[in-house]
Amino acid sequence: MTTRRSRGDGGLHWDEKRQRWIATASLGHDPSGKRVIKRGSGKTKTEAKAKLKEVLRDYEDGLAIAPSDYTVAHAVNDWLTYELSRRDTSTVETGKILCRNHVIPALGARKLRDLSAQDVDKWLADKAATLSTSTVQLLRSYLNRSVKRAMARDKVKRNVVELCAVPRGKEGRPSKALTLAQAEAVLKASEGSRMHAYIVVALLTGARTEELRALTWSHVDLESRQDEQVPPHVAVWRSVRTGGDTKTRKSRRTLALPDHCVKALMTHREQQDKDRASAGERWQEHDLVFASAVGTPLDAANVRRAFRLIIKGAGLDPAQWSPRELRHSFVSVLSDSGIPLEEISRLVGHSSTAVTELVYRKQIRPVIQGGAVIMDRLFGS
């Protein structure tokens, strides 16, 4: 004899409009007095009951059930909109490009609740076949943070992305350093160009490209004060990073300027005065040492494009060189000239000698002695 369900226990019925079986269960009332009813649907009675059991299990675990059509794409787009958008413009653009080119096309249609560690492993392996390890790490990080955000909002029980390791990707182009002869050729090719002072300062001080783009004249002293024993110097205290801070605390440093830098900067300042007069009302004053013809800040693409024209003029392949390799060249030239690792690390603003050795290990040779004087001897005053 069939036992009748108690009042409020729910039931099972056929929905003619949806052409599906609907299993329901009543779970009491919410604080407002409204009855809490959970439902599961399926093409068969068994499927509907199984779906209802899953819904009830999630409810007991404290999860607010995500919509059945909530996908990985929804999670990623929510993260891009509400979390990544707080970062600086370049970070936001990079995140959007990588997510919309690599994450969403491959995994976006997958329901977030059904995403498995195997799905993520296969996706990472596919990406590692064509992308560098650092890019694959970034993609995993974006997906991980998207799912973590969804989990915090009760859209999914657990974050399977955290269970997946990043495979080794394609080898990227290793950073290189100019030889002394190549460095001289680049300096020669840059003479007379708007980038001459930039290249001279980058190559002879080892400053990062983001530090030079943010450098202001108030942080440059081209006068030597013998009575105070203060040589011409540049204060590398800012960068184009968010907030204007340098990459690390030790990156904030003051460097003596070789004579070659002093002369190049004096000529550059005269040219900038002419630009200011020529631009008239169009000039935008930012006190920048390296700026456009109307005083506006340079972006990375401006610098890269101008640098590669000079590299081509020096007889080198522009596709094989980038502005950051002027810094590598600085380290290489100093190392070859006898400067110890500790001094090089201090000059380039690394947090430790371990960083210098790890990043520039192909150029480092353990020897002895000091900075701007060596540069004057090598490149002449």
Image (spheres, rainbow, N blue to C red):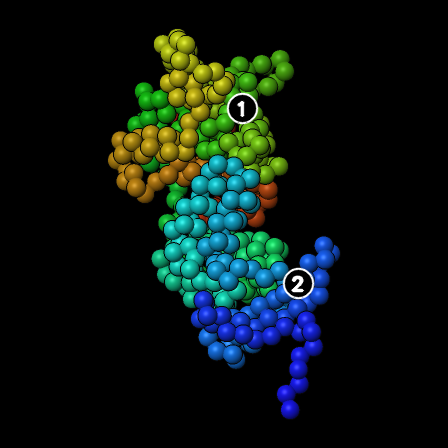
Q: Which residue is mark 2?
A: 36
Instruction: Name which of mark 1 and mark 2 comes first in the sequence.
Output: 2
Task: Please tell me whether mark 2 sits on a helix, a strand or a loop.
Answer: strand
Vertically, is 114 above or below 312? below
Q: Quadrant of residue 107?
A: bottom left
Disc 1 to disc 2, C-alpha distance:
69 Å
Residue 144 position within the rendered picture, expressed as x and y whole percent measured from the top left: 53, 56
Q: Is residue 335 above or below residue 380?
A: below
Q: Is residue 166 left or right of residue 181?
A: right
Residue at 54% of width from left, 74% of height from top?
Answer: 13
Residue at which label 1 appears: 234
Please identify the quadrant where the C terminus is shown.
Answer: top left
Q: Is residue 126 left or right of residue 9?
A: left
Q: Mark 1 or mark 2, which is nearer to you?
A: 2
State which quarter of the image contains the N terminus: bottom right
Residue 344: percent from the left, percent from the top?
Answer: 53, 38
